[in-house]
Amino acid sequence: MSYDEKSKLKVVIPRAKDVREASASKPATPNVPATQPQASVPAVAMTNKQYRERYLAPQTIAGTEIKFSKGGEFVHANNESQKIDKDRQFIVLADQVVAGWIKFNGEGVMPDKVMGLCYSDDFRLPERHELGNLDESEWELGPSGFDKKDPWLKQWHVPLQDVMTSALYTFSTNSKTGHNSISNLLRHYDRLVLRKPDHYPVVRLTVGGFQHKDSRIGWVPTPVFCVIGSVPCDDAAKPPESDDPFSDELPAMMQPKKKHSF
């Protein structure tokens, strides 16, 4: 069973086909900034399909959240002492990658988010000027203590599934180097689907880097998704068969699987 580290709710990641069918069945809706008040609606019983669509919400972190640390390592977001072994292999659930903007509002306050599925026809990533907060005199100082820091940051969430255990992870980043790494990965995915429409990339999480032009900064480590092969989408995570999405029974998708050969 996979859980969101923060909410402790079970997270279900559907197959690519489910994502496409869900997107096709929903009417297109305009982007609405996360700060807009939401109308209250009475609680109603939901079907298993409705639960599945609910977990497509871009705020969801599937499984364990991981990040690229300042020390140049892939680690658990909530415990940097837990590192991701460089030999582990992950299926990238690429058509479920989430992108958008996030604005942190201080400790104890929920951040504002405007995010959506990259490969959904229902979502258009807003331009920065559409989000407001354009008066730089109101911005806080950045880490340097001299430059103002834009309160809105681009953020990415990349769902990953361990090839050996089927455990789910989400790589999250709002850094420029993380953005570049994910962009390279999705360009590879776009080329892959031209040849194999129903396949996902398989990667190892490795480390690259570059020499910064400022000699005081020196070598800058960067995250790299090293593509080592691909697998059919049907080999990736599937929603459980149970009508109860909060059942304590371990779904079949979470049972250990045999190792793939690439």
Image (cartoon, helix red, strand yellow):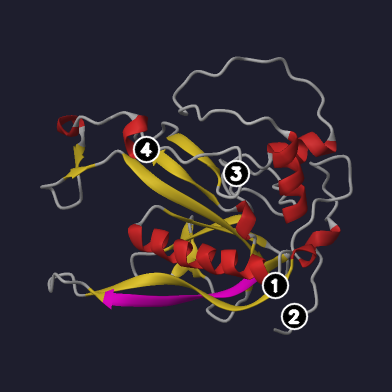
Q: Is residue 1 visible?
A: no
Range drawn in magenta: 201-210
Q: Measure the alpha-carbon separation of dots 1 and 4.
A: 34 Å
Q: Measure the alpha-carbon separation of dots 3 and 1.
A: 21 Å
Pick whichever of labels 1 and 4 is earlier in the sequence.
Answer: 4
Q: Which residue is painted at 78% across and 61% down in the image?
A: 254
| Residue 137 relative to residue 112: left or right | left
Place of residue 47 in the rendered image (x, y in percent of width and height, measured from the top left):
84, 32
Residue assigned mark 4: 104
> What crowding class fits label 2: few (fewer than 14 Cα within 10 Å), some (14-19), or many (20 or more)?
few
Q: Quick check: is 178 in the magenta stretch?
A: no
Q: Which residue is painted at 68% across and 41% down in the image?
A: 55
Residue assigned mark 3: 60
- Locate the C terminus by quadrant: bottom right
Q: Quick check: is 205 in the magenta stretch?
A: yes
Place of residue 102 in the rendered image (x, y in percent of width and height, measured from the top left):
41, 40
User: Tag 3's secondary structure?
Assistant: loop
